[in-house]
Image (cartoon, helix red, strand yellow):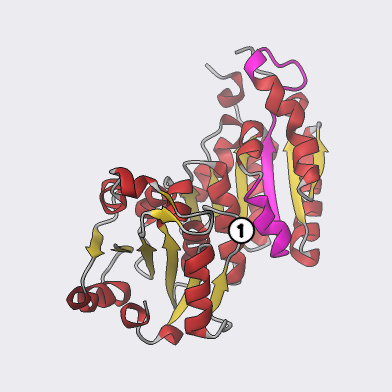
Amino acid sequence: MPALIGRHEDFLIVSGLAGTSRDVATLTRDGAHSYTMAGAMGGACMIGLGLALARPDKRVLVVTGDGELLMNVGALATIAMLNPPNLAIICVDNGHYGETGYQKSHTSLGVDLEKIAAGSGIKATRMISAEEELGDGARMLREGNGTAFVGCA
Amino acid sequence: MDERNDAPARWQDELYDPLRRNNISQFAYVSDAGHHVLIDRSLADPGVRSVALTTEEEGVALLAGADLGGARGVLLMQSSGAGNCVNMLSLIKGGRFPFLTLVSMRGDFGEGNPWQFPMGQAVQPILGAMGVICLRVERPEEVVPTVSAALTMVFQTGHAVAVLLTQKLLGAKQF
């Protein structure tokens, strides 16, 4: 994640639960530019949207997991409709609910969150599964004229 | 045809300006006849962002994010949507976010659709249990003063307030 995000101070960061929150807190040293959640599952993407609309002068990054995103997957449709260019979503898709006993999530069983994001209308989407793809993903978080979705499998 | 749609009451038009004067810049909504004037005016206003939601809890999280960025918003929903918000209200309470919602009520005075009663009757106890103060409005002349009071409570003191626009005010539905 540090390689994908790069200079974290360039973003206002909202994280989902558990692993992604710990990673963001560690990366930013729990800085004032991060808001890490430990509850209210399913809210990370929409907090990011509200923040991105409120602060068009800043880049906003949501870092969440497959379970947290699946709980409110309609948020991708809401975000795509507005398509703020200063918003990007990273979904760390490990296919499991890491905090509750590592049960398989829907993405282990055939659900494809990148396709859902694309089908919702988010135009800039991609999955990253190898180190050499990180550069492309990093560019998507910082460039483009619409919201970006980057999944990490 | 929804009789509530035919001629918007004057208070519906009068409500938009106090919201804008108080710097509300994000209007989050799930489509609803009771709020159609506010929804249409926000869509036509280049100075605000109007956000159609797939479910009401998205709006709760949106308004928390707006506050993180120094902006103010309002969630427009029907009473059935209050149930969809419940766990996300943990975010409002835990993060002490200001939160304003206008709720058009079903399942109360004169309701003709039995499906609307369970949630309509549960709105106040459920929102109250999650720390949201409910202000009920029954008469047209009370709407603007009540929403103005709610704006003060929310944005000067950081509390969560729901203004319940009752069916005595809106007119009951027969279906």
Q: Residue at x 75, y 22 (%)?
A: B108
What's drawn in magenta, residue-wise? Answer: B87-115
Q: Residue furthest left?
A: A132
Q: Position of residue A96 (x, y in %)?
A: 41, 54
Q: Position of residue B165 (x, y in %)?
A: 73, 35
Q: Chain of mark 1?
A: A
Residue B99 on the magenta segment: yes
Residue B89 on the magenta segment: yes
Q: Position of residue A61 (x, y in %)?
A: 42, 71
Is B33 placed above or below B65 here?
above
Quarter of the view holding residue B82: top right
Q: Secondary structure at mark 1?
A: loop
Is residue A123 rendered to the left or right of residue A47? left
Is B104 placed above or below B39 here?
above
Q: Residue at x 47, y 41 (%)?
A: B54
Q: Residue at x 81, y 58 (%)?
A: B153
Is A42 placed above or below B1 here?
below
Quarter of the view holding residue B8: top right
Q: Residue furthest front?
A: A101
Is residue A106 rendered to the left or right of residue B10? left
Q: Position of residue A15 (x, y in %)?
A: 50, 67
Q: Residue at x 54, y 85 (%)?
A: A29
Q: Nearer the viewer, residue B79 or B74?
A: B79
Give the quadrant of the C terminus of chain B: top right
- Residue receiving disc 1: A39
Q: Which kind of residue does numbered mark 1 sit on?
A: Gly
Is A32 placed above or below A78 here?
below
User: Residue A63, can we see it?
Assistant: yes
Q: How many marks?
A: 1
